[in-house]
Amino acid sequence: MKRVEVLKTYKIYIGGKFPRTESGRFYKVLNKAEKPIANVCLSSRKDVRNAVQAARKAQGSWQERAAFNRGQVLYRIAEMLEGRRAQFVEELMLEDYTKKEAQTEVDNSIDRIVYYAGWCDKFNQVASSVNPVSSSHFNFSSYEPMGVIGIMAVKSSGLLGLVSMLMPVIAGGNSCVIIASEDKPLCAVTLAEVLNSSDVPGGVVNILTGHMDELWSPLSSHMDVNGISTDGRNKYITKVQLASVDNLKRVRVYSNDFSLMQEQGIQFITDFQELKTTWHPIEKIGGASNSY
Amino acid sequence: MTAKYRFNEVPPSPSIDKVGVEERVKRFQSRSIKTTAKMQGLKMVLSMIDLTTLEGKDTEGKVRQMCFKAAHLHNGHPGLPVVAAVCVYPSMVGLAKSIVGKYGIKVASVSTAFPSGQAPLDVKIADTKYAVEHGADEIDMVISRGKFLAGEHTFVFDEIAAIKEVCGSARLKVILETGELATLDNVRRASDIAIYAGADFIKTSTGKIQPAATLQVTYTMLQAIRDFYDETGKMVGMKPAGGISNAKLALHNLVMVKEVLGEEWLTNKWFRFGASSLANDVLMQILKTESGIYQSADYFTLD
């Protein structure tokens, strides 16, 4: 008798747990040949609510970790991903990648994680500044994370686009809620398993799958979300921007081709940082003019 | 004035079927309350809150701030009710009364060596007198759990009756501190004793001990109130306190009150929530229900 294959159920990731969607719905992911490759959760606005709640709860302690420690945690993600290469390659191939393309995508993703792991305890030194002022103050500006960031992931990429948008956000001490690519969600869910088995605290990254049609609105209008990072090909960009007005969310639109080496950098981290400027009184020494 | 009932008139308490209680409570939690019903429910919850601060570090400033909040829950949203009462330590009663009195908000004072209740009767009486003299409309007393658990139920009964006498026109809420009573049978017995000794309200917890106001415990106490009402035709109020921090749980409590006791109890004369953080969650739910937009704690007062 022919063995019946046991297909994996792809669940969503909220607060370090893998629940099914609150709505109990699912959708079929099809490949180019219109063949179903998996059943995936069709998340609802209540899943968005739960995910934002989990992200808010986790954000404070993630921000308060030593930057060096955050770097270690990110590096651990890369290690774990490396250990599960084969699975990611296989999933990308289900989503119509050739073997070569899939391998390159996974390699680049791992490298990108290591890249941002390195920045964790360095970007603030590089991006901060000491500002010249004309009073006797030591005036300096440094970066602090914005809080909870909503990420509407790149539609056309299974893994690299997601990783390229996610890593700079958490490297800077934010937590986030991700809406995975509707067409290529498999790697997003598997990435959640990687995150869960590395040292990323539950709730720092939350991953939902489903239709952008119904998820853009609750996420971008949510008063407890502080910023939105979205793929430039998202057809709801204008609506997202309008919905973000109420609590002045920062919206960043990325049309970058993340498969290129140069599409990584410190600017992706500072995109979701707030600049804090401090005026520290100093004694004026001997009448000497002070450029600080 | 003596208590209406003597201890030997307290009927034997029925034993509680814990599994049955859990089953029943589960059914209350599966009710779906949406749109207009939800909105009315939420506003009712607000009007039933005893806004509470009971900490060693309470200052006059803190109490003043809380009293302001009691009268102005969310100024950005007109048409909201005020809370039922503020609940403070006896030393803060005078101050609280001077602020909230004009809004029709009651002042409740904890008393009888709250939260432990480990003091002699004359100290407890003096404590209560002080609060009443400074204008407390309601007294939240604690029972002597040690004595209760040691089986000295008459002692507990007499103590409640004695405090009731000192209260005068102030309404007496009796805190059972169910988290320390260990079993639902004990909760039921303590409820019966408190009710027959003259309690106007029975209250679950001080808020200092976990678990506090679980639905199971509240249900058991509501049953005691129901049985007393069936027996004597007199109403007794109920106040779950501690651990009710979200709107959904509060609504489930209201469903339970309606189905166990009936609609006459759905006013702040007969039902209260003892809570400090519940109000904000209810406010956020009200705004969410009206606007469809999920809210953030960033835009509401801290306490």
Image (cartoon, coloured by chain):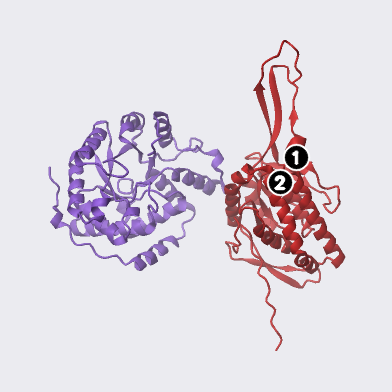
Chain colours: A red, B purple
Q: Is residue A268 above or below residue A108?
A: above
What amino acid type is highlighted by mark number 1? Phe
Tag 2 secondary structure: helix
- Residue B45 is marked as none
Per the image, the residue denoted by label 2 is A171
Closer-to-camera residue (A1/B46): A1
- Residue drawn at the location 71% of the way across and 57% of the way down: A180
Please say if B140 is above or below A178: above
* Residue marked by disc 1: A123
Chain at numbered mark 2: A
Q: Chain of mark 1?
A: A
Q: Residues within 10 Å of mark 2 (few under 14, many from 20)?
A: many
Q: SS of the residue at dot 1?
A: helix
Query: Residue A257 location in percent, x, y?
Result: 84, 51
Q: Quadrant of residue B117?
A: top left
The answer to whether marks 2 and 1 mark residues whose Cβ atoms lie closer than 8 Å is: yes
The one of B184 and B146 positioned closer to us in this rendering: B146
What's under tag 2, amino acid-wise? Ala
Q: Seen from this angle, which residue lies furthest bottom?
A: A1
- Residue A155 or residue B173, whichever sits in front: B173
Which of the image's four quarters has the N terminus of chain B?
Answer: top left
- Estimate the x, y position of residue B235 in percent, counting from the top left: 24, 52
Q: Is residue A161 left or right of residue B141?
A: right
Image quarter of residue A1: bottom right
Q: Is residue A66 shown left or right of residue B89?
A: right
**Left or right: residue B244 compared with residue A85:** left
Marks counted in the figure total 2
Q: Relative to the observer, which residue lies in front, A112 or A94?
A: A112
